[in-house]
Image: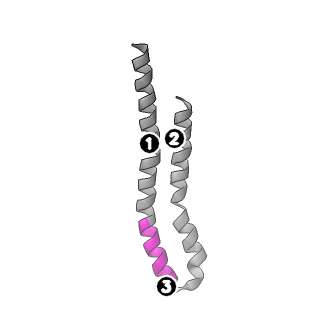
């Protein structure tokens, strides 16, 4: 009985780690879609906005990095 509970606990930890990375990746993709469209429009009008647009395009990716850190921390509990 104790072996089955340990297997279930490990499985739930793996699901939690997967959700941490997966949901943050989806959120970053949705955010980057709108930011990317706005950045291309801004660069088409003013080329000197390229660096700012690039920074704003990269910012949502930090969400995925945070999700990966949380997933590693969750898997460390297993």
**Residue 18, labelled with which disc?**
1
Is 6 rendered above or below residue 64?
Answer: above
Residue segment shown in magenta: 33-45
Name the residue tied to disc 3: 44
**What is the C-alpha distance between the residues marked 3 and 1?**
38 Å
Give me the residue at 53% from left, 46% from top. 68
Helix, strand or loop under label 2 = helix
Which residue is outermost to the top? 1
Give me the residue at 45% from left, 35% from top. 14
CB under 8 Å between discs 2 and 1 = yes
Name the residue tied to disc 2: 71
Is 45 rendered above or below residue 59?
Answer: below
Helix, strand or loop under label 1 = helix
**What is the C-alpha distance between the residues marked 2 and 3?**
39 Å
Mark closer to the observer (3, 1): 1
Q: Name the image quarter holding residue 62.
A: bottom right
Residue 31 position within the rendered picture, expressed as x and y whole percent measured from the top left: 44, 62
**What is the C-alpha distance between the residues marked 2 and 1?**
7 Å
Q: Name the image quarter holding residue 51.
A: bottom right
- Sooner in the amino-acid sequence: mark 3 or mark 1: 1
* Label 2: few (<14), some (14–19) or many (≥20) C-alpha neighbours in 10 Å: many
Residue 43 position within the rendered picture, expressed as x and y whole percent measured from the top left: 52, 81
């Amino acid at each position: 009985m104790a072996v089955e509970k340990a297997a279930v606990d490990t499985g739930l930890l793996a699901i939690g780690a997967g959700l941490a990375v997966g949901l943050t990746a989806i959120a970053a993709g949705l955010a980057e879609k709108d930011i990317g469209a706005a950045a291309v429009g801004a660069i088409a009008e003013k080329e000197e906005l390229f660096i700012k647009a690039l920074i704003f395009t990269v910012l949502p990716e930090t969400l995925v990095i945070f999700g990966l850190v949380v997933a590693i921390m969750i898997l460390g509990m297993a």
